């Protein structure tokens, strides 16, 4: 019987082939990202002359240049304000409506849920023109308030979808017990159910925070002026303006500033983020 | 609502209490639901509704000069060379790029199944390109493709392929494929994760049965695993279609649609019409056309993947 040996060989081949594929893609994914990190501490001359080499001495000064002279610090603060403000409105508003949709069925509630769900796969850039004029009419175009409100509205679909699922899985006895003890609907929500939903809120919050921190297209149209510019816009501007073309080091430092927080957060909450992302795609 | 028989005594009070309870419930529902519904209605649904109206106006952004033109914008689109170019580019990215993304992500998903260190490491970084901002992705790939000091160029020169070097993003023939590669790098992780999760959730007996029948490696994958992924394939293809047809930031940042519209896509053309040329009605017509196109494509895909390929076999057995 030659078969077992042959089988062993093919399985060995298969395993080393898949290890080879893994290694190949590992390199393709990781090397460009590492290259950004390494380039952020190289001088402009080193970046253009020896793109593959390590720096002779780390140029931490690149970060100073990016932060203050290139205005990335200001954009960083704008992004922080908009992201946190969006979450501060989005999470309670989203949780309240998700709670109703999960536990207080009424005529039309599934229609409302369906309407929220429909927004999940809808590319928001398709309505950018009406949205631009809506904000202009409301006098919140080119303001952080306007961008925040838009971010809340366009994050609702996904947030409501995930949190509704979460509230459905919480045991009903707990809210019933609270109601029997004389707590009203609203007290039951704030004191009993919302604290139980904390893990769900954290995941949704982190997931949204990453998307908002990185968001470029809406911000490009809705906050044109430099004063309100968010971080991705600041970096894009840095790439395009001629005056900084000599200071490549500062540009790469800027790229690190925008991606480092996300990389750190992602590596901590990886499994949860992956699951959440897939859940959204499968249902949407 | 409440279980059991209502008490025979004091039926009036019970009815009144019930009525009050109902009112409380209604009030609670309205107050908790309305902030989200209002925000969603005003900033998502209303602009969506308006988009259909806008597409039938000729309008340069000053309210006094808004003029209803019916279908004129759409008939203009039908004869617009740049629009045709954008649609073609989008479809090319979808068909060629989409095919590459699907094949590579399935291979990756397969490689991610392993228990080795390599597979584990791969699993932990697979979504990283999708987590960093598109601005980072665009800038990074502009540096890879830079003809003077780019990673690709210097790498090719180092291994003696210097004569094949192009100014990748500046030549009409190479610009779209280059942008497509950057897009694939960004997008593949998500689909790999999708397929990988689906493969892992397949019942184990199937794999064992296939192994007993002597199906191994690629054959086993092609004959056994792949057909069982039908519902995930459908999700992946529809998702990919929507994503590719609406690609914007990456193209806008890398080439702005150039050179000579070689990388123009629907949404960069929309942006140009709206926010460079102030042709707001025309730009919105592009959005509606895109929306309709994606709908048609999705319906075709859904019809194509409608049936569970396992179903007839099971019936026969």
Image (cartoon, rainbow, N blue to C red):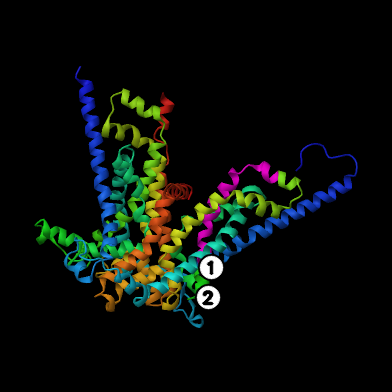
Frontmost residue, B68 versus A186? A186
In the rendered structure, does residue B206 fall within the stretch colored magenta?
Answer: no
- Residue at 30 percent across and 44 percent down: it is B108
Q: Residue at x 30, y 38 (%)?
A: B116
Residue position marked by numbered label 1 in the rendering = A149
Q: Position of residue B164 (x, y in %)?
A: 12, 60
Q: Which residue is found at the position 35% from the left and 70% from the top?
A: A235
In this rendering, the answer to whether B90 lies above or below B232 is below
Callout 2 secondary element: loop
Horizontal arrangement in the rendering, residue A184 relative to residue A82 (left or right)? right
Dominant secondary-structure state across the stretch colored magenta: helix
Q: Quadrant of residue B315?
A: top left
Q: Nearer the viewer, residue A149 or A35?
A: A35
Instruction: Say if the magenta span includes residue A159.
Output: yes
Would residue A281 be visible to someone looking at this image?
yes
Q: Which residue is mark 2?
A: A140
Query: Is residue B48 in sight in this rendering?
Result: no
Tell whether label 1 touches label 2 (CB within 8 Å).
yes
Among all residues in the image, which is located at the extreme top?
A1
Image quadrant in which the N terminus of chain B is located: top right
Judge whether B197 appears above or below B251 on screen. above
Question: Bounds of the magenta span?
Answer: A150-176
Relative to B228, does residue A262 appear above or below in the rendering? below
């Amino acid at each position: 019987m030659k078969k077992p040996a042959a089988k062993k060989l093919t399985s060995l081949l298969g395993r080393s082939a898949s290890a080879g594929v893994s290694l190949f893609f590992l390199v393709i994914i990781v090397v460009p990202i590492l290259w950004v990190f390494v380039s952020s501490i190289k001088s402009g001359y080193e970046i253009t002359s020896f793109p593959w080499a390590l720096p002779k001495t780390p140029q931490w000064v690149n970060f100073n240049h990016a932060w203050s002279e290139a205005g990335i610090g200001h954009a960083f603060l704008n992004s922080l304000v908009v992201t946190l403000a969006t979450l501060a409105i989005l999470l309670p508003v989203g949780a309240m409506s998700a709670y109703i949709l999960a536990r207080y069925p009424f005529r039309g509630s599934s229609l409302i849920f369906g309407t929220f769900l429909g927004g999940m796969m809808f590319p928001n850039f398709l309505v950018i023109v009406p949205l631009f004029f809506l904000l202009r009419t409301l006098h919140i175009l080119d303001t952080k308030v306007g961008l925040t409100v838009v971010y809340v509205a366009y994050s609702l679909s996904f947030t409501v979808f995930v949190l509704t699922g979460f509230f459905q899985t919480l045991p009903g006895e707990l809210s019933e017990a609270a109601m029997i003890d004389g707590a009203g609907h609203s007290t039951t929500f704030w004191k009993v159910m919302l604290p139980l939903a904390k893990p769900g809120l954290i995941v949704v919050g982190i997931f949204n925070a990453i998307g908002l921190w990185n968001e470029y297209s809406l911000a490009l149209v809705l906050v044109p002026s430099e004063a309100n510019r968010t971080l991705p816009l600041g970096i894009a501007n840095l790439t395009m303006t001629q005056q900084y073309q000599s200071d490549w080091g500062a540009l790469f430092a800027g790229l690190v500033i925008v991606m480092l927080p996300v990389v750190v957060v992602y590596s901590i909450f990886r499994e949860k983020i992956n699951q959440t992302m897939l859940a959204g795609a499968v249902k949407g | 609502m409440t279980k059991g028989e209502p008490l025979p005594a004091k039926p009036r009070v019970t009815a009144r209490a019930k009525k009050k309870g109902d009112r409380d419930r209604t009030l609670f529902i309205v107050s908790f639901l309305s902030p989200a519904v209002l925000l969603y209605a005003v900033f998502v649904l209303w602009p969506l509704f308006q988009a259909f109206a806008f597409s039938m106006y000729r309008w340069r952004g000053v309210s006094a000069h808004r003029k209803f033109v019916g279908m004129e914008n759409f008939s203009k689109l039908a004869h617009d060379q740049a629009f045709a170019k954008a649609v073609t580019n989008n479809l090319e990215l979808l068909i060629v790029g989409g095919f590459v993304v699907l094949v590579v992500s399935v291979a990756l998903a397969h490689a991610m199944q392993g228990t080795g260190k390599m597979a584990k490491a791969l699993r932990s970084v697979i979504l990283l390109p999708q987590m960093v901002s598109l601005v980072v992705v665009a800038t990074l790939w502009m540096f890879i493709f830079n003809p003077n000091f780019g990673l690709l160029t210097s790498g090719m020169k180092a291994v003696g392929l210097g004569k094949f070097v192009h100014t990748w993003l500046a030549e009409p023939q190479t610009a779209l494929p280059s942008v497509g590669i950057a897009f694939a790098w960004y997008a593949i992780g998500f689909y790999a994760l999708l397929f990988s999760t689906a493969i892992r959730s397949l019942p184990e007996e199937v794999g064992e049965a296939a192994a007993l029948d002597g199906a191994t490696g690629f054959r086993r994958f092609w004959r056994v695993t792949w057909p069982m992924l039908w519902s995930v394939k459908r999700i992946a293809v529809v998702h990919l279609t929507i994503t590719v047809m609406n690609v914007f930031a990456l193209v806008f940042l890398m080439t702005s649609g150039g050179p000579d519209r070689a990388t123009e896509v629907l949404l960069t053309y929309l942006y140009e019409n709206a926010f460079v040329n102030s042709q707001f009605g025309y730009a919105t017509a592009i959005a509606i056309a895109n929306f309709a196109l994606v709908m048609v494509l999705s319906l075709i895909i859904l019809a194509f993947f409608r049936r569970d390929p396992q179903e007839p076999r099971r019936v026969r057995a």
